[in-house]
Amino acid sequence: MRFALSVALCLSAPAHADSFTLRSTPDTVIVYPQGAKVTRNLSVALPAGTHDVILPDLPEEVLWQPSPQISVTGAVLGAVSLRGDALPPLADADPEAIEAARQTLKAAQQALTRHRDAEADIQLQSDAAAAQIAFLEGLTRNEGLPADVAGLRDIATMIGDQTLAARQQMLRAEQSVRDMGDRREELEKEVQAAQEALAALTTARDDRAQLTLAVTAAADATARISVSYLVSAQWQPVYDISLEQTDPARLSVKRGAAVTQQSGEDWQDVSLTLSTVQPSGRIAPSPIPPRRVRIVEPARPKADIAQLGQQRAAPMEAIVDAPAVMEEAVVAVARFDGPGVSYVFPDPVTVANDVDATRITLDTLAFETEIFARAVPLRDSTAFLMARFTNTAPEPLYGGGEVAYYLDNGLIGFGDMAHIAAGEEAELSFGPIEDLQLERVVLDLNEGDSGILTRSNTRDEEIRISIDNIGGRTWPIELLDRVPFSEQEDLVITYSATPPPDQQNPEDLRGILRWDLELAGGDSQSIVLRQNLKWPDGMILQ
């Protein structure tokens, strides 16, 4: 159990008025798709009597969530108070890791300061030498120089010697500054690394809440306290889905989860569980209101409607009760011991506050799969590789927006995946098959007139669909196309296809046609689709 315990005893107060301040950190966390339940477990030795147990370091978000759940064993829980204002300062020192990081940062900053001071000292020496050179150069322009040759020779020698010495001093200083620049960069990097290390340990916010519990012990006892509260967090599934084109083909789904939290505190080495239950969602079925119907007289002619304006307005109740003019809207261990599914992680997990998502690996599932090509010439110029499989796992594959697709161990792209229930058959796509080239050409389009003054009331189309396999592999192909459909008797639609489709209206999609083909390498297949539409004169086709 991870907590720091500091006991503040009021020595002048009677035994039944002691106060115990307990520092703690999260122990277990259940993360839902939206929100998380955090639990802290503490224990404290209590003498007989009634005492205040103070938890001073809960995250501030507890103040805005439903009341914390509290359980006490070994004593009796009394009054509970929660506040976020006018809190006494926390007396305990920072955890050892944070204090060590602060000391490391302080030492790095001091080393950098000393180095910069040394650079400044050398620069001062260079500046002094430059000033000396300027002074010596000024002597050569002095009108008070001696006139005799020997005196001038001595002054010239002195100026030359001193100037040389000063320039040598400047050169040595500049060389030292250049050499020290590399070391300064190293020290600056050390300071930056120490700052980042400290920031990683102090992502939690300083805002906090304090929970005070009145606890009564009948005799000296050890009270065990559990406090659970809700905070802001979320998780979403992530997948690496790999298709191996072996015989038979195999589909592997590596499952993971991306967890983020904004609770205001770090979760350090917690026991983590992911749940698919949504506590903020509905927990009860929708109510169904009574449906009252009635009959009324047919609509009156417009002449009678004018007379209605002279009558007394209908009661408000009649307006409210009028029926609406619309139809009714038609590597974690998984547990199934309640609503939804829970994934329990065997090892401690750390999730920092308000940082990038922490990715956690669940497990890898394997499925036998059928691979084939799907061709949609109406929209695409190539066919696409498809994998059809049945989810034989005892649990669903939850839809996720972060899915990486691999084909024969090579990354082909990113996409999403719809929810796949346990036992459900599903299809996944693994990119275009460039060897399968598609073409759809309208060979003939005729719109005839039934008369000079009437609009067109017929439409004939002839379409050629072709698929060419320019590779060497034989592919099973599902080719999809469409013909128009209508729910109006006056709009008559007929069609014919050569060869005829193998299936009409697959998955109850009206007007969709499917051909099941097998195309060897170097072969091609053509389909001719004819369709005719007829409607009454004076009508418009939409």
Image: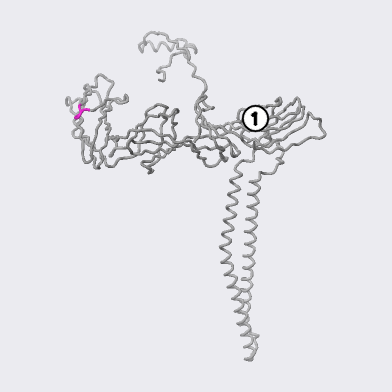
SS at circle 1: strand
The residue that mark 1 highlights is 226
Q: How far across and down, in percent of the image, does residue 391 sit?
A: 40, 29
Q: Is residue 406 magenta?
A: no
Residue 350 falls in image quadrant: top right
Residue positioned 55% across, 37% down in the render: 347
Residue furthest toward the right? Answer: 12
Asked if one can make out residue 313 in the rendered structure from this viewpoint, the answer is no
Q: Is residue 370 left or right of residue 447?
A: right
Colouring scheme, one of rainbow, by chain, secondary structure, one colour: one colour
Q: How far across and down, in percent of the image, does residue 495 sit?
A: 21, 26
Q: Is residue 499 magenta?
A: yes
- Structural crowding at the residue carrying mark 1, measured as other residues with C-alpha within 10 Å and reported as few (<14), some (14–19) or many (≥20): some
Q: Main secondary structure of the magenta part?
A: strand
Residue furthest toward the front? Answer: 247
Q: Is residue 397 left or right of residue 178?
A: left
Residue placed most toward the observer, 214 or 168: 214
Tell me the magenta residue range.
Answer: 496-500
Q: Amino acid at mark 1?
A: Ser
Q: How far across and down, in percent of the image, does residue 233 sit?
A: 55, 35
Residue 242 falls in image quadrant: top left
